[in-house]
Image: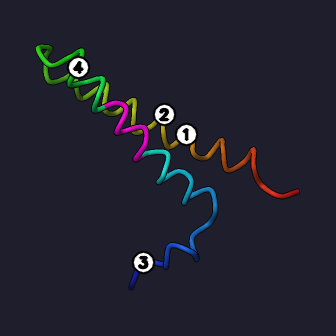
């Protein structure tokens, strides 16, 4: 079974994916600049926070900007 096209996905899912990419980009910068010498688990935690935080922020933006 093929995955649905990007335009066929629900709006909140699309915003979550874009938000997760943006969050991971910010988290990658933070992890490399400030936690380069830290343990792997610290960098992993930073990247996970970026992924989940960005995804959540994307869903929040989708809900705030939806048509009523």
Instruction: Give the mark nearest the N terminus, 4 or 3.
Output: 3
In what element is the residue under mark 3? loop
Residue linked to disc 1: 56
Direction bottom: furthest residue? 1
For mark 1, does the 10 Å Cα neighbourhood hold few (<14), some (14 to 19), or many (20 or more) residues? some
Q: Are marks 1 and 2 in contact (CB under 8 Å)?
A: yes
Residue linked to disc 4: 33
Query: Magenta span: helix, strand or loop, mainly?
Result: helix
Q: Are marks 2 and 3 in contact (CB under 8 Å)?
A: no
For mark 2, does the 10 Å Cα neighbourhood hold few (<14), some (14 to 19), or many (20 or more) residues? some
**Percent of width and height locating residue 66:** 77, 54
Q: Residue at x 75, y 49 (%)?
A: 65
Q: Residue 3, which numbered label? A: 3
Image quarter in which the N terminus is found = bottom left
Q: Is residue 6 left or right of residue 30?
A: right
Instruction: Give the mark nearest the N terminus, 2 or 4.
Output: 4
Q: In this rendering, is residue 19 above or below 67? A: above
Between the residue at mark 4 and the residue at mark 1, the CA separation in whole angstroms equals 24 Å
For mark 4, does the 10 Å Cα neighbourhood hold few (<14), some (14 to 19), or many (20 or more) residues? few
Instruction: Give the mark nearest the N terminus, 4 or 1.
Output: 4
């Amino acid at each position: 079974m093929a995955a649905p096209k990007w335009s066929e996905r629900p709006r909140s899912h699309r915003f979550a994916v874009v938000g997760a990419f943006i969050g991971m980009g910010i988290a990658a910068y933070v992890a490399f600049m400030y936690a380069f010498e830290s343990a792997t688990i610290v960098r992993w935690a930073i990247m996970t926070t970026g992924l989940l935080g960005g995804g959540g922020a994307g869903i929040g933006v989708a809900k705030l900007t939806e048509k009523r």
